[in-house]
Image (tube, rainbow, N blue to C red):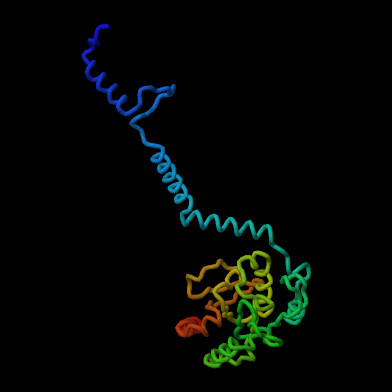
Amino acid sequence: MNAPTSPFAAELSAALQWWQMAGIDTDFCDDATDWLGPSDAELAEQAAAEKRSQSASANTPQKQAADLAAEQEQKKSLLRADLLGDSPPSDLKAFRQWWLEAPGIDAIGPRGRIAPRGPVNAELMVLMIDPEERDGERLLSGPQGQLLSRMLSAMGIDEESVYIASALPRHTPMADTGALAAGGMDAVTLHHIGLASPQKLVAFGSGILPLIGQKLTQSDTYLREINPNAQKVPVLMSEGLDSLMAMPRLKARFWRRWMEWSAE
């Protein structure tokens, strides 16, 4: 048999010898193969990178905020309850009785609830998220109450002339104020403030805003006002009394806020 006469005979022979030396002399694959394309490992890494990129773009701060707002609205629509009922308390005396006896405003029931104290139309109302852990008959009867007493004395305000209340009826550590507000407690708190009808309100607690019908943000030093029962009440926000006890710098900041706010 004559030797190949193709001008590429030497190159073809060398290529075949290379594959034979490599131990590969037969290819049974029927499909086209991209010998110069990326490997399976490279393709997997590219797919993973694309997935990470898509995940990052889907979790921008704007997207997260929108998702959170939608989730909160959904919770509100699903869990919202009319805790005040068809005949809500019409004055503070009736509200105190309702506060101590109404079955639906917390999961435990009436036992152990702490009533608010103070006069109607007070110069100042003080609102915190929940009572102190060891409160009994009197709201804020422990260390936080002692701090509040000293603060009111420094302000030149008689404590007995202040309306002191909590947004929740009993001590509730780590309370999910957003969920509680969405469940109807914000309406209860605003109704309570409306009945108390104070001239000004100081709200203690970093998570108290949802319970007075506001978004959970404290970018401003204080809220200008809220409108319970169509009544405008100026509001000063502050960290909780427990936080003020633990961090003296917060006491100094509260005092600066108070001086600016009360001068308006």
Q: In this view, does 158 lie above or below 41?
A: below
Q: Camera-side residue: 60 or 31?
A: 31
Q: Residue at 52%, 80% (x, y): give it.
A: 243
Position of residue 24 measured from the top left corner of the image (x, y, whole percent): 35, 26
Specify the quadrant of the image occupied by residue 137: bottom right
Position of residue 34 measured from the top left corner of the image (x, y, whole percent): 37, 29
Q: Is residue 90 above or below residue 122?
A: above
Q: Camera-side residue: 212 or 40?
A: 40
Q: Residue at 77%, 74% (x, y): give it.
A: 102
Position of residue 211 measured from the top left corner of the image (x, y, whole percent): 62, 71
Q: Residue at 60%, 59% (x, y): give it.
A: 72
Q: Residue at 41%, 46% (x, y): give it.
A: 49
The quarter in which the N terminus is drawn is top left
Q: Is residue 209 above or below residue 262?
A: above
Position of residue 120 measured from the top left corner of the image (x, y, whole percent): 68, 84
In this picture, residue 66 sits left or right of residue 74: left
